[in-house]
Image (cartoon, grey):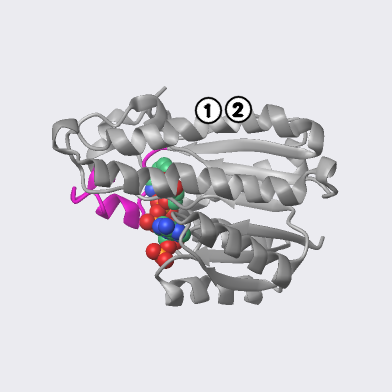
Amino acid sequence: MNKNMLITGASRGIGAATARLAAQRGWNVAVNYTRNASAAEAVVADVRKAGRKGLAIQADVGKPDEVVRLFKTFDAEFGDLHGFFNNAGILEKASKLVDMDVARLERILAVNTVGAFVAAREAARRMSTRLGGKGGVIVNMSSAASKIGGANEAIDYALSKGAIDTMTIGMAKELAGEGIRVNAVRPGMIDTDIQRDTGIPDRVQRAVPQIPMLRGGTVEEVAEAVLWLMSDQSSYCIGLLMDVTGGRGL
Ligand code: NAP
């Protein structure tokens, strides 16, 4: 297999775990990040250790022109794009609706929604058989928050992910006839740095009583779901909003 995957937000957390697992499964991997170059280089080192091509590409997904540059750099370095994991996302300090300002909402939407939309468009432009591409797979990153709603902590984040669910369904239907399968993963509580960004200590542990499986999930468990959606094993699946939640939000 000589397939190329681009993952946004792959220097840490779920994106990094997916990059590592993808390399073990034979993918070459482009590791996008925005600030943490050393973390991105550590992921790239592991991709190369697995015998695959790896490269870190800095770009802020919250800036449309940087998303376009990210894909152009990918084209030059890797060639064909076979798999795109639209993963980069942010979560801000836990807050109630009445305390949220518009600047915060705009920051979240710029990365989680507009950024993801523009990135999916760039991937589709390259993969579409109608436009001369060879087809491919897009996996969007949603969240269980899209169903639960983020009350008392992150309604802004939840709505940014609700939009991901909607666009996943639209893109899945629009692109299926052009050789592109589009699906999403919706993780529940996964213990990554993003949890610390809320300012709530032990956020995952606190949520455990509300999780039917009585534990948070791991980055590896989400990565497995992404790799399945990327693989031919899911060849007849489109528009899935795949919960990886231990039952949270059911
Ligand atoms: P994380 O550990 O905080 O990692 C975030 C990653 O995204 C880092 O690689 C970071 O790069 C990158 N990033 C942040 N802003 C970016 C931007 N503007 N442009 C490009 N890259 C950017 O978070 P995570 O938990 O793995 O989250 C990954 C995705 O999963 C997010 O979309 C999140 O909403 C979603 N998710 C997470 C959970 C969970 O429980 N953890 C649950 C549901 C959904 P730097 O290292 O350069 O900062």
Q: What residue is rendered at 25% in x and 41% in y?
A: 102
Look at the image and tell me whether residue 202 can be seen: yes
Q: Nearer the viewer, residue 26 or 152?
A: 152
Q: Nearer the viewer, residue 22 or 159?
A: 159
The picture quadrant for ligand 1 comes to: bottom left
Q: Check residue 166 for magenta coloring.
A: no
Horizontal and vertical percent position of residue 233: 75, 40
Whether residue 246 can be seen here: no
Residue farthest front in this picture? 65
89 horizontally vs 80: left or right: left
Residue bearing mark 1: 166
Badge 2 marks a residue whose secondary structure is helix
Left or right, residue 19 beside residue 145 = right
Where residue 2 sits: x, y (%)?
80, 63
- CB atoms of marks 2 and 1 within 8 Å: yes
**Toward the viewer: 207 or 185?**
185
Q: Is residue 193 magenta?
A: yes
Q: Residues within 10 Å of mark 2 (few under 14, many from 20)?
A: some
Q: Quadrant of the C terminus?
A: top left
Please state the horizontal and vertical placement of residue 221, each as a whole percent of the image.
51, 47
User: In the figure, 66 relative to 204: above or below?
Assistant: below
Q: Residues within 10 Å of mark 1 (few under 14, many from 20)?
A: some
Query: Which residue does the image show at 80% across and 45% down from the upper left?
Result: 135
Query: Seen from this angle, which residue lies furthest left?
Result: 99
- Relative height, residue 83 to residue 28 (above, below): above
Residue at label 2? 169
**The residue under label 2 is which amino acid type?**
Ile
- The residue lying at 64 percent from left, 72 percent from top is 54
Question: Magenta stretch?
Answer: 188-205
Q: Quadrant of the N terminus?
A: bottom right
Q: Is residue 118 left or right of residue 134?
A: left
Per the model, the C-alpha gap separating discs 2 and 1 is 5 Å
